[in-house]
Amino acid sequence: MKFTKRKKMAVGILFLIAGLVIFLAYFYPMKQATLSWNKVSDALGKFEVSAFFNEGEVILLEFPKPSDVNIPLPFNVTIIAPDKTETVFEAELLMHIPFVQWNITLIENDGGLEVEEGFLGGTAMQTGNYTGRVDDTLIVRNIFGGPPSVLTFYRGIVGVNIVYPYQDHLPLGIALIFVGGGICSWAYISKKPLLDRKRLERKRLGR
């Protein structure tokens, strides 16, 4: 297939445009939401912990590390809102070596929290004191070797990071610009008369 000057120029311009778009995308920022945790309250050797939260804040209840010898059976955990409505979860220890992993299932929600599946907590729907309570049962005492050594309430802190997600594409953009520029240059000089090209070559060599 024979490439005419117009086709060569069109291909070169396409490469230039693609390279320029990718190059400019390098400088395009995006906002990325982050969630960090700030400890609000903890209770040592007890089956419940309380802390004050404002409506809209994210609440997380955390267990201590389970004992080395335990029977991993499910047990109930309740988070009580300021108006005494309850959100009940079922917690089941899946593994504790090499890291602790819990399976959290929502059983009942009376409206005190807005809950996401698999999360021991949620978004506070009221302002006031929330109480996290672990059932005092033989299963819980077996898992933790007695009352939980510590129960901790955390508050989620939502932040925003500025990221540049297309930084890795910068070399590709530069390469396309060079390729497109080369093709356009080739298209521009390819149809010049041979005599003109020789004259330009002699001028370049200083003859």
Image (tube, helix red, strand yellow):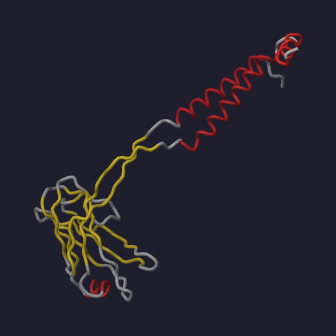
Which part of the image, by quadrant, shows the N terminus?
top right
Q: Residue at x 25, y 70 (%)?
A: 152
Residue 126 appears at what percent x and percent y? Answer: 15, 56
Residue 49 appears at what percent x and percent y? 18, 72
Furthest residue to the front? 206
Q: Is residue 86 left or right of residue 73?
A: left
Up-down relation of residue 84 to residue 181 (above or below): below
Number of dots carrying numbers? 0
Q: Residue at x 27, y 64 (%)?
A: 60
Q: Nearer the viewer, residue 1 or 152?
A: 152
- The answer to which image quadrant residue 40 occupies is bottom left
Residue positioned 25% across, 77% down in the render: 150
Give the quadrant of the C terminus: top right
Asked whether, in this view, residue 20 is left or right of residue 191, the answer is left
Q: Residue furthest left?
A: 83
Q: What percent of the width, then of the height, locates residue 10?
A: 70, 21
Q: Is residue 67 left or right of residue 121?
A: right
**Residue 190 image point, x, y percent:** 81, 18
Residue 119 lies in quadrant = bottom left
The residue located at (29%, 74%) in the rendering is 63
Q: Nearer the viewer, residue 110 or 183?
A: 183
Q: Is residue 37 above or below residue 166?
A: below
Whether residue 190 is situated above or below residue 125 in the rendered picture: above
